[in-house]
Amino acid sequence: MLTVYSDDHRLHFGQSELVDGKLQPCFEMPSRADTVLARVKSQNLGEVIAPRDFGVDPIHRVHDPRYVAFLQGAWARWVAAGHSGDLVSTTFPGRRLRRDGPIPTALMGELGYYSFDTEAPITAGTWQAIHSSAQVALTAQDHLRQGARSAFGLCRPPGHHAGSDFMGGYCFLNNAAIVSQAFLDQGAKRVAILDVDYHHGNGTQEIFYQRNDVLFASIHGDPLVEYPYFLGHADERGEGAGAGCNFNYPLAHGTGWDGWSAALEDACRKIAAYAPDAVVVSLGVDTYKDDPISQFKLDSPDYLRLGERIAALGAPTLFIMEGGYAVEAIGVNAVNVLQGYEGAAR
């Protein structure tokens, strides 16, 4: 299986996040991608290539150009104002505040408008890192366009919490959504996104919720008690043309393979019935039993079985790296999914 990877991911490295009332180093760190890459190479998964640059047009197909322009220029505005630390939002539109008004012109107001939490710090290298992450995904997608059965976009930063015009949860640009739209723009009629990250892909759901050309299925921690809290309930089934194309599987803390795989099986049956031209997997492995910010109990061999089940769908499959914060195990678990898929697909 081809892997696409860029060293540019190291240009984004948030220095701290607020956890249990204390500032500590961000869980989303460069060593995550480095560990996965090392495992890809040690297991001889296949060729590793650098991304091509497809520009911002495929990004604009998913994200509001005003939001993208904000991401491109935010750091320069921050530095020009005399600041040097990470740019982190401190103000957000509340439920009872006006949502249809003009976008603030002050940097911190605009940042709050485009954010839903404080977990997406903007640093000097953030734009280049997230732009390259999207190009990694698009290059892997182009490999499938040329006839490959599968590919792996080793994306960092991750993307599935990013919506059409908002960031959060370590995510700025939604790589899975960008490549799904690229498939459609190139002639696909239907694409399915299977999100197996521990945290609900709220951004992906927002982007496609009213559309029937993308089916979204997500298996995740129950949003009543788990981040990102406000989306991901089972009764969210899509709206308008998208009614019946959104499937959420919220699961309780402590869920292991038996309960998790039952949700996977149902999601895969729905994907198979949808008969997509391509499947995009938001590959988070923070479902692992020792992940520091997650509460499921999957073990490393379970990821082989996950890959095997995805292969049974029989569709061209693009894997996009999302979460996973047990850094020592993330490489084993992510590559286990890919090897499980490859072994079953032969």
Image (cartoon, rainbow, N blue to C red):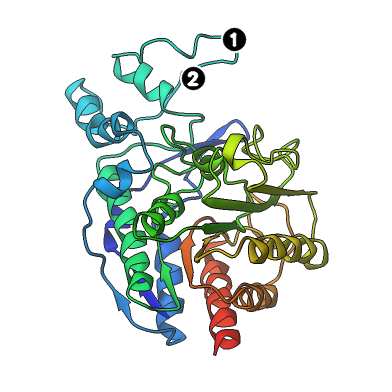
Secondary structure of the residue carrying tag 1 is loop
Name the residue at 58% across, 74% down.
337
Q: Is residue 268 above or below residue 332?
A: above
**Residue that numbered label 2 is attached to:** 92
Which numbered dot is residue 343? none
Q: Is residue 279 left or right of residue 11?
A: right
> Which x, y percent locates residue 217?
64, 53
> Which x, y percent locates residue 236?
69, 38
Q: Nearer the viewer, mark 2 or mark 1?
A: 1
Secondary structure of the residue carrying tag 2 is loop
Quadrant where the C terminus is found in the figure: bottom right
Q: Is residue 106 left or right of residue 99?
A: left
Q: Is residue 166 left or right of residue 65?
A: right
> Which x, y percent locates residue 84?
26, 31
Categorize mark 1 by other alpha carbons within 10 Å: few (<14), some (14-19), many (20+).
Answer: few
**Residue that numbered label 1 is attached to:** 96
Mark 2: amino acid: Phe
Tally the numbered discs.
2
| Front-lying residue, 109 or 277 | 277
Categorize mark 2 by other alpha carbons within 10 Å: few (<14), some (14-19), many (20+).
Answer: some
**Location of residue 329 (image quadrant):** bottom right
| Front-lying residue, 151 or 287 | 151
Residue 142 makes an appearance in the image: yes
Q: Is residue 311 left or right of residue 17?
A: right
Mark 1: amino acid: Arg
